[in-house]
Image (spheres, rainbow, N blue to C red):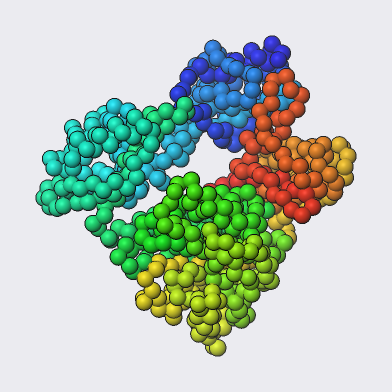
Amino acid sequence: MPFALRWTMAAIGASQQSPHPEPQPQGGAFAVIDAAGRLLRWSPGAERLLGYPAREVLGTAVTDLLGNGADTARFDASQPSYLGSVSLRHRDGSAVEAALWATPLDDGWLLQADHGSAVRQTELDHALLNGLFTESPVPIGVFDTDRRFLALNRAGQRAGGFTEIEGRTLREVAPPGLLDLDAFEERQRTVLDTGEPLLRVQVQGTAAAPSHSHLVWSETVLPLRGASGEPIGLAHVLVHNTCQEPAPELQRWLLPRRLSTMDTVDVAYRCLPARGPSGIGGAWYDHIRLSGARTALVVGDAAGEGLHAAAYMVRLRTATRALADQDLGPEEVLTGLDAQVKRFMVDFAVPGSGPIGTTCLFAIFDPIKHELSLASAGHPSPVIRAADQGVRAVDMPIGHPIGVRGAPYERTIVPWADEDMLILSTKGLGAADDDGRPGTLLAALNSLASPTEPHAAQADLSVLCDDLIDRLDPRGQLRDAVLMAVRLRHLEPQRYTTWDLVSDPKEVGRARALAIEQLRAWDLSDLEFSTELMVSELVTNALRYGKPPIQLRLIRDHDLTCEVLDHSSTSPHLRHAADADEGGRGLYMVAQLADMWGTRYHDRGKTIWARQPLPGVA
């Protein structure tokens, strides 16, 4: 590495060591510097962060932007790295605390920065506090290896009446008679010594004053592991066994509370709790944003009853999302889910049939290709209510339930029109016949048609869900149930564009120019910097390693997506190039610039895509 560049980057690096994993790159401030540390590119995000327009900083030394507090003692320039927290100088003279990342280019560096406070807040918010800890309806306590409290969530504080618990043991803060503290501490020692969790241990105790009622909990103690794999703490999860009222609340918490916003689908859903003694079950739904403006729609019903079914449901929903993120077809997702269940049965020695017999319907909606493809694993087929009020069941094969032997799953492609509605449900709603066909649901939908107002039922999906439940009257059903209604729309042609590229290195420059011209037509000049770099890297990658024909496509829906298609099935790999390597950094840079990126395979090749959020869109 040239000495000037090494000195420049060393001046930017922060000399703070952290036992925690380094934060992932974030923020919209980007700059490119050459080997001498001079600024070559300056993004709108960088201007917003520091106040300098590009014309004032291009060609100057990046060190001119360092504040007085910048620490130059540490920098390892051998690989892409997090440079830590630095002090930068704003145009108005004030200091800006920022987190900084650097990615080596062939003859320079790509710098990415964000407010230091934003990075810390992101790490805090996304670790586990909000979703899985703070707002959990289940009491959860976190302890260090000395069995002292590190944290206790709100449900735990309400349940125990604890205050000022940090740094103290449960014995020091628990009210008298809460539980057998000797046994509690023995369970903690066992998990710390063995590194193995204790699952669903029945614990009895007494509530605090004034009720002093008898309580029974199901306690799970989990080891928390550090980077070395050794336990660094404990998490205690308590579920009340004697109170049935929180069960529906628990299941609602396990399911999505807010589905992703989409431009081409509207979604409404209803969840009905189980009417058996447990009040909880394994029915679930999901709505997953995929690449290429596509959407995955999922309903499923985990086998079993009660808390076991709910636990299986969480595993299955997580596995389904992971498989969907690989851009697999509906039948491939169900095949992968089937394999996961069979492996789970063996690896965890699950007693009885476990999740075997789970049903699932998986659909992918493509508003650009105008395609709706579905596959079923023992699940009732859905119903389409056309915009002209016609109602029909989707004619599709019903495959074997998850974990049960049977023929390979099959994909069905069905026609649809704008404003058509897809209605999906689970068996607990009583909407399907014994053969899995939705005869009862069809009858209920037909009964909602109004001769005087033929489009009334199309207007509000939530009203439609409520009306259907009233018609189906599932009060005699013991299982929990899910109903999901989805309105479908195509993506307008003016919101995406495709260019054919020839197999010539000169096409890289042309591709950049085409992309910039389209962004300006869409009034997205803030994304020109990052999009130009991504287009350059993806098209270069396709020209070097792919096969013609090659296409570039930009899609503007809820995000901006850049896609490059070629006719080679060679799988790209993200790697960390060494300092002396001449290449290998393209996909790494794309990964830093994009909100998400991936590869989608098709019959005649692949599509590499990268997605960025639109300015001002949450």
Q: Is residue 612 above or below residue 245?
A: above
- Up the image or down, 251 lies above or below 179; here it is below
Question: What residue is shown at x 45% (from left), y 62% (from top)?
Answer: 303
Q: Image quarter for residue 235?
A: top left
Inspect this view and state whether residue 532 appears.
no
- For the image, the number of numbered tags is 0
Q: Residue at x 68, y 18 (%)?
A: 37
Front residue of 314 and 67: 314
**Closest to the observer, 300 or 587:** 300
Q: Please give left or right for residue 191 compared with residue 172 in the image.
A: right
Q: Residue furthest bottom?
A: 451
Nearer to the camera, 428 or 186: 186
Instruction: Name the residue at 47% across, 37% down.
Output: 122
**Residue 108 in view, yes or no:** yes
Quarter of the figure with residue 497: bottom right
Residue 131's spot in the image, x, y percent? 41, 46
Image location of residue 338, percent across then percent down: 56, 56
Res 114 → quadrant: top right
**Image location of residue 130, percent across then percent down:** 40, 44
| Side of 163 where 324 appears, left or right | right
Question: Measured from the top left, where is residue 217 in percent x and y?
Answer: 25, 49
Residue at image coords 28%, 61%: 245
Give the quarter of the figure containing the N terminus: top right
